[in-house]
Image: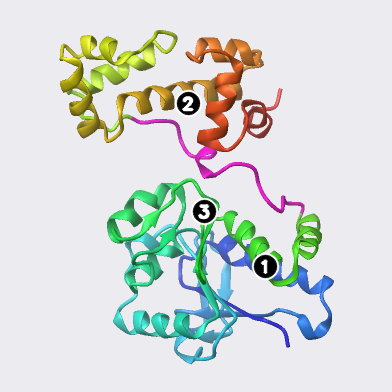
Amino acid sequence: MGKTVAILIFPGVQSLDVTGPMDVFCEANRFLPPQEHYQLEVIGFGHGNMAASNGLSLQAHRHYSEALQAYDLLLVAGGPQLPFEDFGAEFDDWLRGATARARRFGSICNGAFMLARAGLLDGKTVTTHWNDAAELARLCPTAQVEADRLYVQDGNLYTSAGVTAGIDLSLYLLAQDYGPEVALSVAKRLVVFTQRAGGQSQFSPFLTPHAETTSAVAQVQLYVLANLTGDLAIADLARAANMSARNFSRVFAREARITPAEFVERARVDAARVMLESSCAPLKTVAYRCGFRDAQHMRSVFNRRLGVTPQQFRLNFAAPV
């Protein structure tokens, strides 16, 4: 008997959160015997047609209140307005029951907020779209939100990052069900990677200082951005802020919410990202201008922070010439 996969949609849903996973499991049926085929179902919060955020009209197979079976996999899609929406106690009750019946459950993109409001992420390790990670952490403070992951498994809970990461998660689930060969075959059909390099921080915007613009810390942040090739040791930064080194470290961490060393490294990575995207400068030149010891040091930091090498980043994001 095949596995049942249900995806929950609502007015304003991100259409790719729905169609991406559905295409993965649908394409998988090409490579599976009929008795192993996935059975796909779309569950709707509303009745009738629902407009996705891009205007595409979607229609659910049934209303959520009628979906009382035990699905093998229940996924909640996301949407631009989802972090601000509360679907009510009745829906939350249904969602808690549906996920309890399901063998596996999870979310695509910021569908995690729907799970969080139903109390299903408490104490769990999860991810969501990088732009919504901080808000999800505030909504569910007991959850460990991994903002750089493309997808996360915590027991039978599966959460994914933004939009196309739903495809990454679905391929991962497919490989769990039927092995990596089937997942690779589907990935080839969809012309995607079975496992993308790096996390979602490589797609996120560049560093933005958190400190108040009038504070001494903000002035030091600007000093760092203007002097990336300098030593930028704690003593140097403290002098720029007219503080003792000890007091500066404490004040900076409180106001900027990261340590001075962390800020300096992030700033250098972001400067390198700009150069890699916008120029053909050799890697050793990029490393020097952005304050890394050498190209190998830059490679090591990129691997640790972004999960890709500088060369891979340039191949992925450099503007065509």
The magenta stretch is 191-208
Q: Which of marks 1 and 3 is nearer the N terminus?
A: 3
298 versus 6 height, above or below:
above
The quarter in which the C terminus is drawn is top right
SS at mark 1 in the image = helix
What residue is rendered at 60% in x and 60% in y?
169
Within-10-Å neighbours for mark 3: few <14, some 14–19, many 20+: many
Residue type marked 2: Asp
Residue type marked 1: Gln
- Residue 163 drawn in magenta: no
Q: Which label belongs to residue 270?
A: 2
SS at mark 3 in the image = loop
Q: Which label belongs to residue 162?
A: 3
Within-10-Å neighbours for mark 1: few <14, some 14–19, many 20+: few
Q: Name the residue under label 1.
A: 176
- Residue 195 drawn in magenta: yes
What residue is rendered at 43% in x and 64% in y?
112
Query: Quadrant of the rendered structure where residue 315 is?
Result: top right
Tell me if 256 is positioned left or right of 123 in this view. left
Tell me if 222 is positioned left or right of 128 in this view. left
Tell me if 151 is positioned left or right of 209 in this view. right
Query: Quadrant of the rendered structure where residue 143 is?
Result: bottom left
